[in-house]
Amino acid sequence: MAAVHLTRNDFDEKTKTGVVMVDFWATWCGPCRMAGPVIDELSTEYSGKALVAKLDVDAEPEIAGKYGVMSIPTVILFKDGTEIGRQVGFSGKAGYVQLLSKAGI
Amino acid sequence: MSDQVYDVIIIGSGPAGLTAGIYTSRANLKTLLLAGEKWGGQLMLTTLVENFPGFVDGIQGPDLMMNMRAQAEKMGVEIKEEEAVGVDFSKKPLKVGPYLARAVIIATGAEFKWLGVAGEEKLIGKGVSACATCDAAFFRNKKVVVVGGGDAAMEEALFLTKFASEVTIVHRRDEFRASKIMQDRVKSNEKIKIKFNTQIAELFGEQKLEKVKFTSGEEMAIDGLFVAIGHAPATDLFKEVIELDEKGFVLRKQQVKKYKMMTSIEGVFTAGDVHDHNYKQAITAAGYGCEAALEVEKWLEEK
């Protein structure tokens, strides 16, 4: 199952509660395209425990700006709307699993 | 550990490794390619590749690598996105992590070099970047510095001019080693300034990069810094295992004389930027990958 794409219309709503991991990415970024399938995999594996989602920084530059994203891929982990960790640069699946473990899952 | 013995294990998934895989698989050799989680090599961080033959209008680096990978997989290469951990070449079959093979091709390429100056590490992703093509868009109408003097630095600088208001290339020597065509493009671009004989001493900023200080003591307010000072051969795994030169490149020792891609250990071959300190091009890496694959095929036949 592919990870859900967030937009300005649902970003706050979707990240407000629970554990949410958001992959800030763009089509023109090579490492983002490596990360894409891994994020999709994780969204399936963590289904029910966490929402693993993507955010296209081209489409939503304001949200990227709000969170100070200046390098992609950047993956930010939220718990109940608060950032509790981030991973800058593609870290492989293991890196993202480790990031998710910060939320106790 | 499985008892399966591959004909060849290729370590690395850049142009050298994938080309080698295409050739060995086509020669009906059972091939395992350890790609690493960050697969695809240096071209994954580039934009338009204009000098790889066969693409009239050029091709995006990541597209080129995805195509090479798809082609290798179609030919039957088994690709695992795993890092190679620990090699044992002291006996046959050769061992790479838990996997066994009759021959090995080392095509691990080269690793990105950071500047190693104070302030750099904590500002990575906060203005300090290794990839202009990934991050340039975050520097719209901002001031940025590119460090380096090779083709990669020129490409990054030119790409950044599409977004940044001002791009300064900082290079420690008094001339670039980039190809003439890239130098000409840089020098004729009005947005690009050049500072030769200049090195970075320290980077400053808390939430994000704010200022750079040069070794001369001069300071400059900037928003972004892109590092492009080259790569070092990725040979940590092979230290004390095969012979490397003083800079860490794999040496082609031709353990069996007629195989020019063979290392100091019989049956272990090499290809690409991990041994090549001269050319370092996508096409030469691919060429070396082909040579190594043909030699593996021949060597296995003769065994």
Image (tube, rainbow, N blue to C red):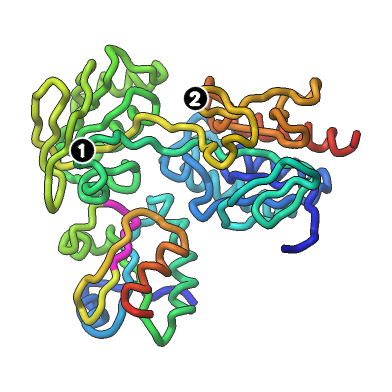
Residue at image position (49%, 36%) is B110
| Magenta-tinted stretch | A71-76
Which element is circle 1 on?
Answer: loop
Dot 1: within a 10 Å radius of its alpha carbon, few (fewer than 14), some, or many (20 or more) residues? few
Q: Position of residue B196 (x, y in %)?
A: 23, 17
Image side of residue B13 versus residue A57, left or right: right
Q: Are marks 1 and 2 in contact (CB under 8 Å)?
A: no
Q: Position of residue B1 (x, y in %)?
A: 72, 63
Q: Position of residue B16 (x, y in %)?
A: 62, 37
Please say if B33 is above or below B168: below
Q: Chain of mark 2?
A: B
Type of the residue with mark 1: Ala
Q: Where is the C terminus of chain B found, in terms of image quarters?
A: top right
Please say if B29 is above or below B110: below
Image side of residue B192 versus residue B46, left or right: left
Type of the residue with mark 2: Lys
Residue at image position (27%, 29%) is B147
- The image quarter containing residue B184 is top left
Residue at image position (20%, 38%) is B118
Residue A65 belongs to the span the image colors magenta: no
**Residue at the far right in the pictured view:** B302
Q: Position of residue B259 (x, y in %)?
A: 77, 25
Q: Any mark on residue B247, and which?
A: 2
Residue behind mark 1: B118
Residue A73 belongs to the span the image colors magenta: yes
**Residue at the far top in the pictured view:** B174
Dot 2: within a 10 Å radius of its alpha carbon, few (fewer than 14), some, or many (20 or more) residues? few
Residue at image position (28%, 32%) is B157
Q: Inspect this view and state whether residue B164 appears.
A: yes
Image side of residue B248 versus residue B154, left or right: right
Q: Chain of mark 1?
A: B
Is circle 1 on the same chain as circle 2? yes
